[in-house]
Amino acid sequence: DSDYGSLVWVFAGYKKEMEKLFEHNLGLPSRFPHHFVFEDYNDEELGSIFKDMMTYQQKSASPGSAKTKARIRQQPPPFNPSYSLRSDSNGSKMKDRFGRTWTYYQYAGWTDDLGNRSIDPKQLGKAGYELVDPSGNFWEEDGGTWYNLTTGSVQRHYPGEP
């Protein structure tokens, strides 16, 4: 058999349930010799993760005499629980408040014609509903100004437009 070793099986689950699975057949442990156990986070680690997810740094930059406020996010935005409850159909279309058309792709979410992604185009640019450009930068809009939360840059045009 020339395909020996090209098949990979992954079993994932809670530790006790996985132990029970391997107890049902004494030959399983020898067939699955590699085990990766991810320990639970402790209270300190969970607190640090929560803090990182909620932290924004305020930076002020002053190009010339005009002051600009750039907000930089330390980590990607927290998961929006409403996303998992969405029931959009593959190929659905909607327009955002900027007039752009977005298409919903199953397993990829909403994408505009420039390759930007969003959880919900109706809320696009608001905190928690950032636009994610093809390079992975997070953008938030406020009063016609787009803030790149990843790099700290600021621009007046829609991300991806010249």
Image: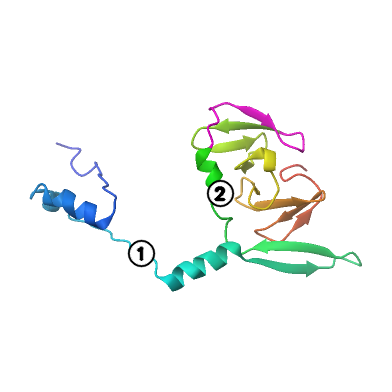
Q: Residue furthest left?
A: 26
The residue identified by callout 1 is 40
**In the shown orientation, is residue 13 left or right of residue 118?**
left
User: Would you say the magenta stretch is mainly helix, strand or loop?
Assistant: loop
**Residue type, label 1:** Asp
- Residue 53 appears anywhere in the view: yes
Q: Which mark sits nearer the N-terminus, 2 or 1?
A: 1
Please provide the residue range marked out in magenta: 86-100
Q: Quadrant of residue 69?
A: bottom right
Whether residues under marks 2 and 1 lie with C-beta atoms below 8 angstroms apart, the answer is no
Q: Callout 2: helix, strand or loop?
A: loop
Vertical arrangement, residue 39 with respect to residue 138, above or below? below
> Residue drawn at (75%, 62%), measured in percent from left and top?
70
Q: Quadrant of residue 153?
A: bottom right
Q: Nearer the viewer, residue 75 or 126?
A: 126
Q: Residue at x 59, y 55 (%)?
A: 77
Q: CA distance from mark 2 to mark 1?
A: 22 Å
Residue under circle 2?
80
Rendering coords of residue 9 (x, y %): 25, 44
Q: Quadrant of residue 95?
A: top right
SS assignment at label 1:
loop
Mark 2 neighbour class, 10 Å CA radius: few under 14, some 14 to 19, many 20 or more: few
Q: Where's residue 73, x and y in %? A: 64, 62
Q: Is residue 147 magenta?
A: no
Question: Which label sits on residue 147?
Answer: none
